[in-house]
């Protein structure tokens, strides 16, 4: 049967959507256990609206009481007032960002799609770090882009660095962009200053763009001294795109507002931005009420981020305490972000171990293969998990590993 045929009556679907649309075994089993109603120690929590924190002080509803809600003056870049809010956000970080080089989107996923469409012909290539977030593969497929990985490796100091030989080997004449996730999801590692300098030299020589996803950048926990806090203002001579949004900055994933900062040499920057403006004008995806409320929300972000930071730090401390004297599970250093990594010794079938852990102990963790780890067995945990549940789940995980790891 033709793989592009639909299930009924010979309807055809595009090759770019040729995915396995069935639930994977992990997701299917987790859904079954939740339906049973028995307690589940879910250590994968990353939804800030489902982690037991009170975010009511943002005053969401009151912020929509604005003049202009019933007016419509579309701007493909986003309302100037909202772009000024983003400019002020970077100013607080010590970076002067022209509002004229900011473009608002509904999500960073939209921003990636815009950039891929700007830079890539069908079957052009984009480099992504490994480990990395699985969403990239779908975004690339939708844009007819091919992904190639460059490895991140952990050193004896517990910090992740780019494997430069693997990076250079991944480059081809069809490489159009390099994605940097800062801090990385799921490793929680910031890009190292020397690695960024190396990438910039290569990108400038080969005319390759850099796309930096910084949605977790406000959640630094234990960053090394050579960590790069942001690529905004750091990519001289290279066409680059810095992405972020309120999904993480304000813990408001449902409000759908993100942005890209476009940087680069003036001779290419103006042309690139005009083309992006046409792409954005074709969608006009950001809604006016959110843009009008945006300034109010950003004014209260310190309160929100303080709550989240407290949960993140409390859970990292609990993880290190519980696993301190147990050599079978290595809690890797978390420089920033909402995820933690455990390296599981003596586990040779990662998927089987994680499924049995969920079945026998009612503890859910994500297996490392979801995130394209090159070697070893890993568990990926969500640091927003309520702390009581987090501690009990970790103790159950450690006890189960003692009994079943080889």
Image (cartoon, rainbow, N blue to C red):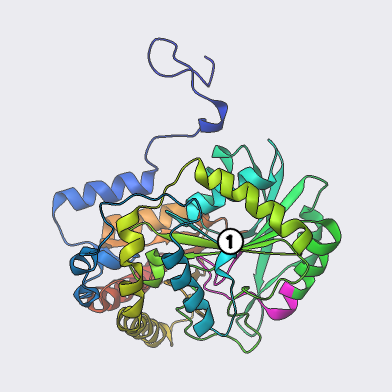
Please identify the quarter of the rendering in which residue 169 is found: bottom right
Instruction: Write the start and end of the magenta stretch as one range.
Output: 180-196
Residue at left 60%, top 86%? 224
Please identify the quarter of the rendering in which residue 55 is found: bottom left
Q: Residue furthest top?
A: 9
Picture layout, residue 17 above or below residue 265: above
Residue at left 20%, top 52%? 34
In the depicted view, which residue is nearer to us: 332 or 175? Answer: 175
- Whether residue 5 is visible here, answered yes or no, is yes
- Whether residue 213 is visible here, answered yes or no, is no
Mark 1 nearby-residue class (10 Å; few <14, some 14–19, many ≥20)? many
Q: Residue furthest right?
A: 205
Q: Which residue is mark 1?
A: 131
In the depicted view, which residue is nearer to us: 262 or 140? Answer: 262
Count of residue discs: 1
Residue at left 52%, top 21%? 4
In the depicted view, which residue is nearer to us: 300 or 144? Answer: 300
Q: Position of residue 85 (x, y in %)?
A: 44, 72
In the depicted view, which residue is nearer to us: 358 or 146? Answer: 146
Picture layout, residue 79 above or below residue 317: above
Picture layout, residue 65 above or below residue 275: below
């Amino acid at each position: 049967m033709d793989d592009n045929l639909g299930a009924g009556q010979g309807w055809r679907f595009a090759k770019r959507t040729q995915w396995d649309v069935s639930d994977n075994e992990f997701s299917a089993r987790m859904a079954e256990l939740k339906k049973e109603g028995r307690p589940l120690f879910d250590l994968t929590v990353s939804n800030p609206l489902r982690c037991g924190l009170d975010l009511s002080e943002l005053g969401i509803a009151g912020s929509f009481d604005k003049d202009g809600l019933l007016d419509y003056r579309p701007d493909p870049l986003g309302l100037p007032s909202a772009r000024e809010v983003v400019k002020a956000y970077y100013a607080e970080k010590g970076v002067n960002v022209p509002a004229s080089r900011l473009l608002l989107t509904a999500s960073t996923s939209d921003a990636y799609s815009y950039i891929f469409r700007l830079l890539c012909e069908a079957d052009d290539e984009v480099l992504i770090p490994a480990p990395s977030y699985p969403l990239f593969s779908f975004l690339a497929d939708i844009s007819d882009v091919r992904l190639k990985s460059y490895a991140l490796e952990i050193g004896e100091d517990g910090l992740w660095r780019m494997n430069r030989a693997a990076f250079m080997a991944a480059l081809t004449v069809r490489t159009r962009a390099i994605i940097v996730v800062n801090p990385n999801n799921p490793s929680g590692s910031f890009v190292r200053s020397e690695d960024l300098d190396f990438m910039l030299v290569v990108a400038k020589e080969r005319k390759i763009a850099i796309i930096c996803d910084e949605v977790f950048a406000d959640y630094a926990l234990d960053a090394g001294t050579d960590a790069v806090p942001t690529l905004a203002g750091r990519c001289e001579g290279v066409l680059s795109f810095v992405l972020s949004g309120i999904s993480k900055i304000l813990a408001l994933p449902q409000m759908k507002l993100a942005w890209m900062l476009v940087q680069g040499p003036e001779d290419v920057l103006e042309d690139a931005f005009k083309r992006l403006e046409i792409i954005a004008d074709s969608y006009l995806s950001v809604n006016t009420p959110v843009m009008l409320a945006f300034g109010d929300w950003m004014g209260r972000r310190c309160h929100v981020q303080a709550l989240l930071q407290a949960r993140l730090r409390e859970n990292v401390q609990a993880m290190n305490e519980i696993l301190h004297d147990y050599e079978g599970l290595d809690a890797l250093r978390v420089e920033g972000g909402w995820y933690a990594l455990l390296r599981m010794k003596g586990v040779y079938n990662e998927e089987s171990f994680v499924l049995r852990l969920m079945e026998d102990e009612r503890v859910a963790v994500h297996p490392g293969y979801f995130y394209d780890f090159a070697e070893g067995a890993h568990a990926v945990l969500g640091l927003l998990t309520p702390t009581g549940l987090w501690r009990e789940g970790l103790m159950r995980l450690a006890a189960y590993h003692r009994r079943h790891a080889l």
